[in-house]
Image (cartoon, helix red, strand yellow):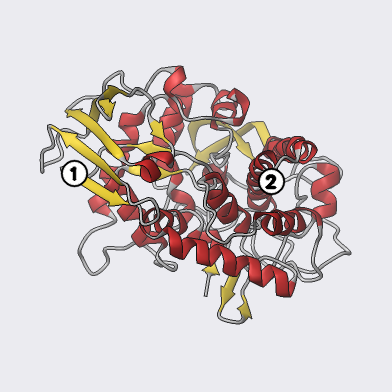
Amino acid sequence: SFYCIWDSCRSIHPLITLFDPESQALMIRSLLDIYRYEGKLPDCRMSLCKGFTQGGSNADVVLADAYVKNMTQGIDWALAYEAVLSDAEDEPLNWAVEGRGGLASWKSLGYVPADDFDPYGVGPFTRSISRTVEYAYNDFCIAEMARGLGHAADYEKYVARSENWRNLYKEDQNSTINGTETGFTGFLQPKFMNGTWGQQDPIFCSPLLNFTSCYLNPDGHETYEGSSWLYTTYVPHDMASLITTLDGPDSFVRRLDYLHESGLLYIGDEQGFLPVYQYHYAGRPGKSAARAHTYIPSQFNTSVNGIPGNDDSGAMGSFIVLAMMGLFPNPGQNVYLITPPFFPEISITNKISGNKATIRNVNFDAEYTNIYIQSVTLNGVAYTKNWIGHEFFVDGGVLELTLGPEESAWGTRYEDLPPSLSTG
């Protein structure tokens, strides 16, 4: 059972790739067998039963994540590419359980309209905002595979479609809480087929307003299990462009702080994971570390209620493991965002290469006063980037982090930020 890949693609599959790549490869092959015999990759699957598609075609993310991390064990990557193209181009008769709906609008308008007319398949006509940004990221993941497999024209096509998140960004949309301005402007909003704007309060479907109104049903709204505040931050492939759109790094950091501290974000839903670490893209990796330490142990701890929300096939459990390891993945990309582990040292031995990767803290203290990286060496050589690739885990080595009680200049320079589509 894959249950819902919308949940598992964000943390549990990347974690299994680290700890047990052979099993992850078998799961990839299983996904491809489902495509081979049933014609579509699943998004949610319980044994032999098709579950509901929650957003985009998120098996695309799992496949791309394995591809860019160079997994090969018996995986037919030509078939995998055929499968993700099917998600992007061919709408199934029932897109409630597989594939994507609204593809005609997606291709012609560049977004999923709130009043979409879709005679080609059936599914709940909801989640126009969240489906738009998820389809955009799914297409970026396809573009990554296209580039690696030598399909240059497809690469350009899907890179262009990955920019479609911009089409629902309304730059003059404000946000208030109980009648008080939040001080931030510019949020994703629904749009109709004729190009005019709809409206959904940016805080709607957050814990502050009608939290349970955006579930998967015909009466759902334009975002899924989260608010426009949350989904406006979801451009995992081009955070640099998003940050520029949202008035630059300082403004983006303030916006992230507000998202985490106002009660708008619920960490018990998987979309809340990446915003903990998106400070890296604004040149503030220390704030990612500090934010992780606010959720651990306030929301993740050893009490009866020590996992927020539904563990969702290990999504919550794998989030805390990755967070405490100190290398958090941007799923679908060869990017791990570096923060200090919650331990003096951790090591992972790659089961395929046999090499051991070690992350070691210098000046570690069990009270977690020293949670800010001051400097880093990789195999004894100074390392300034605030991220690292999967090669570290395959080749092995020692990443040594020197810690201190205050933020430092480490990982803050433009050239040390994680890659974004717009920055190459």
User: Which of the two residues, 134 or 224, is positioned nearer the viewer here?
Assistant: 134
Count of labels in the image: 2
- Residue 345 - label: 1
Extreme-bottom residue of the structure: 48
Classify residue 159 by image quadrant.
Answer: top right
- Horizontal and vertical percent position of residue 151: 75, 41
Q: Residue at x 37, y 26 (%)?
A: 284
| Residue 343 position (above or below residue 422) | below
Q: CA distance from mark 2 to mark 1?
A: 37 Å
Amino acid type shown at disc 2: Asp
Is residue 368 found left or right of 244 in the rendered image?
left
- Horizontal and vertical percent position of residue 14: 44, 53
- Horizontal and vertical percent position of residue 243: 54, 27
| Residue 326 position (above or below residue 123) | above
Kindly identify which residue carries mark 2. Answer: 139
Tell me the SS state at disc 2: helix
Front disc: 2 or 1: 1
Is residue 396 found left or right of 278 in the rendered image?
left
Mark 2 near mark 1, Cβ–Cβ under 8 Å? no
User: Which of the two residues, 412 or 210, is positioned nearer the viewer here?
Assistant: 412
Q: Is residue 259 visible?
A: no
User: Badge 2: how crowded within 10 Å, few (<14), some, or many (20+)?
Assistant: many
- Residue 227 - label: none
In which quadrant will I find the C terminus?
top right
Q: Residue at x 68, y 49 (%)?
A: 135
Counting residues from the start of the chain, the first of labels 2 and 1 encountered is 2
Classify residue 321 by image quadrant.
Answer: bottom left
